[in-house]
Amino acid sequence: MTSPPAISVSGADAPFRPHQRAGRSRLALAGVGWSILNTLLGAGLSALVFALASRVLSPDDFGLVALATAIVMFLSCLTPVAFAEALVQARDLGPRHLDTVFWAALGAAGILYAALFLAAPQLAVWFGAPDLAPLLYFVGLRLLIDAMAAVPGAIVLRAMNFRALAQRTAIANAAGGLACLGMVWAGYGLWALAATQVVTALFALMALVPAARWRPGLHVSGEAWRDLKSFGMFSAGTRFLAEMRLDQMLIGFLAGPAALGLYYFARRLFQILGDLTAGAFNPVSTVLLASFQDEPEKRREAFLITCHASALLAVPVFAGVMAVAGTAVPFVFGGHWAGAIPALQAFSVIGMMASLGVVQAALIRAAGRADWWFGYQAVSQLSALPLIWGLMTWGLDAVMWALTLRVLLLWPFSVSMTLRLIDLSLLDYIRAVAAPFSAAALMAGVIVNLSPLLEGAPPALRLGLEIGIGAAVYLAAVIPFSWDRLSRLRSILRNRKATS
């Protein structure tokens, strides 16, 4: 995939590069490859670093860093960083839009970091964690770094330059991983986890700037802000609901760092696995479905193919994790994480649904219904808080399965909206994803029934057999059931010169 041409603008109203029109199928397919490489490099290294750090650090260490991260991410959601998504979606874009979003995000981040710096000692007292204040000073630097990266990231994504995104992820995660491992080796404990976040964000910014080939100017405009406000406000609200981490803060407040550490451990594994699977399709589906705004037939076909591909990769992974967690967690991460197994299994159910949710979210936003998606996310995320508050006295396991049930009960509303937007029947939707779910269920059943036969076997052998036999069963089951759609994908891959 060739690099996008350099940007040349001469004023605040000079047109910026429009959406890709020709060769979108080719760019999207190449984007899938780069996104998969992106996630394999990024999430794979993150998983390795996470596994090594987990064997050394305790749930209390993870919980304290998770609490600091939750507070910082809550403040980050108050900045207009999410307006960068409006830059990706906008049809008409000029330098004034880019400059306005950049300076608004950076200005808000600076104000909030100053407020955090002043409030950190009191927050440490409130949560009963004296070490929280210095962590907030350090992790809070992400506010400034993420604000500066928002517009360059939007430029690279708008240009469908997925290779640059893959390179950014590889560089950033390598730097963050090396920093974490070096500090763990040197005995810095929980500071290694904190350093990973800041170093990763900093190197991601450093990789994005040359790829975007853009520098901020002074074309700040209230009119440009109004152009982006409608979509940007809903994107900001959606990001706030998805990233505010009120669940982590509430668990930390009610149950302390140890319980939060177990929750964060399970959630972090869920996120890594999501990045390794469905996450590969997120940037591709976002841009591709946005570019098909005026072509309903092509958008419908793109949606079904992307849903099938995402489920094909993600569903067996999460189903497999549910089945092997009892063996894998103590062996890979250490016995002190056994208490996180039920939470991880609950997150795995959520992960299977999320493999479709990322594509549905992209479709709904691309169809101009960011307002609906915001409302859906508001109900979904905020409904978790009373569940945590009311059930935490029963333990983390009760909370996790209640949260999972909440996702399953709300899921049909998202599906219904998606089907209406693209005039798709429920039967066609089910056909697109039935094979991966059916094959994964068969695979999980085989693993569960195999486990008693492997009692007493060395953990490494047992885990290897469970994974190997499970994978073989899944592939044998899914290929005949998915043959038509796999053939369609293969024909698209062969026709690399296909255009939209």
Image (tube, helix red, strand yellow):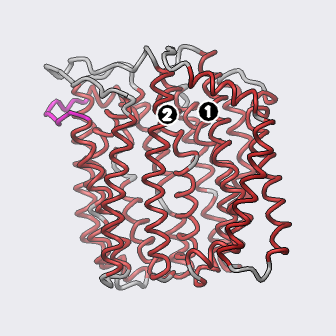
Residue 284 is marked as 2
Up the image or down, 67 lies above or below 104; here it is below
**Residue 261 belongs to magenta span:** no
Q: CA distance from mark 2 to mark 1?
A: 9 Å
Residue 306 is marked as 1
**Amino acid found under the numbered disc labelled 2:** Val
| Sequence order check, earlier mark of 2 and 1 | 2
398 left or right, relative to 78 = right
Q: Residue at x 28, y 39 (%)?
A: 152
Toward the viewer: 62 or 415? 62
**Amino acid found under the numbered disc labelled 1:** Thr
SS category of the residue bearing label 2: helix
Q: State which region is magenta.
A: 212-222
Q: Residue at x 67, y 80 (%)?
A: 393
Up the image or down, 468 lies above or below 482; here it is below
SS category of the residue bearing label 1: helix
| Residue 391 appears anywhere in the view | no
Toward the viewer: 16 or 310? 310
